[in-house]
Amino acid sequence: MPQKPSPPRTSSASPARNGSHPDRLPAAYPARRATKAGANALREKSPGPKTPKQADLWPLKEAQPFLKWAGGKSQLLEQFEPFFPDSIGSYLEPFLGGGAVFFHLKARFPAMRARLRDVNPELINCYTVVRDAVEKLMDQLDLHSEKFRAEGKNHYYQVRSRHRIEDPVERAARMIFLNKTCFNGLWRVNSRGEFNVPIGSNHSDKILYRRQNLLAASRALQGVDLAVEDFRDALGSAKSGDFVYVDPPYVPLSRTASFTSYTREEFGQDEQEKLAELFAEAAARGARLMLSNSDTPFIRQRYQAFKLHTVKARRAVNSDGAKRGLISEVLALSYR
């Protein structure tokens, strides 16, 4: 069997260009098929290599979320798998967040048409730029990496203070930079819609992105309909045959659990009640819906007419690390 060609050698004393991201390669680098081992290696968290891993040189079949998002579903995909439909022609997600479910289903059903919605304009802009201008985005992220290594927290707080940026690429780069270097990867805004999370710890060698993952995300997003839209309008557009994954802000498990606001708009009990109503209406129109939420009596009562299942998730966001254990979440299904 012929041996695979080795990646071209690079001299540590002569990088491709000043400040380039360690995962960036010349465009002429030949494409290679991703392997399961390579994909798994790419998912592993690390303090950040100084030279690219071999896995980072190969195209990925399935993109992973490029933002760290509270309540992200990457950890639950294996548990979700038995509940996904056997085929999906059209997909709707009214609370996009980190996009783990979308990226997973798009890899499984490549011809799937998708409408992705969120009320957070910064988030939708970020996905739009990844779809339409991913190379320019990586250039901007490289600049942030250079300045962050040189200036540390001064650069972080300077970027955080820039709340009004017109250029979409710069806005998207700002969001990814802050998301990857802030405390716990939270995206929290004040009443004026301004991001206000402090810098995180152990931030000296953060990797802002993986080149092949962003490229895979960009490919997955081609042809996808992205828009800033309230969940009421998004769910109101669900039609017969659509598969709709609904991942709203969760009902808090305690009075002190709801400490984060991802947009200026709150999502309280009234919104949860309206969501349950719209869920039932969309199901009556023939849409297939799957909803995630906290395992509480309130949620179980609101969705008692549907099939309810339980999954176990790690609670990743808590000021006390000892309390980041497994918790139960409810899945409500309008089909099967």
Image: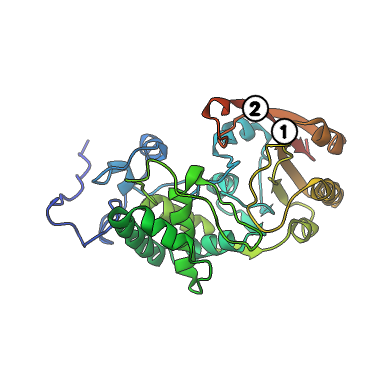
Amino acid beneath label 2: Ile
Quadrant in which the N terminus is drawn:
top left
In the depicted view, which residue is nearer to us: 268 or 225?
A: 268
Q: Residue at x 60, y 50 (%)?
A: 97
Q: Earlier in the sequence, mark 2 or mark 1?
A: 1
In the depicted view, which residue is nearer to us: 73 or 55?
A: 73
For mark 2, give the secondary structure.
strand
Is residue 64 visible from the viewing direction of this image? no
Q: Check if mark 2's residue and mark 1's residue have beta carbons within 8 Å.
A: yes
Q: Is residue 278 left or right of residue 138?
A: right
Q: Which residue lies under the disc numbered 1?
A: 253
Q: Residue 139 falls in which quadrant of the image?
A: bottom left
Local crowd at mark 2 within 10 Å, few (<14), some, or many (≥20)? Answer: few
User: Residue 267 placed where, x, y %?
Assistant: 74, 50
Quadrant in which the C terminus is drawn:
top right
Q: Is residue 45 left or right of residue 121?
A: left
User: Residue 22 placed where, x, y %?
Assistant: 27, 51
Q: Residue at x 31, y 57 (%)?
A: 151
Q: Which residue lies under the disc numbered 2?
A: 327
In the depicted view, which residue is nearer to us: 240 or 322?
A: 322
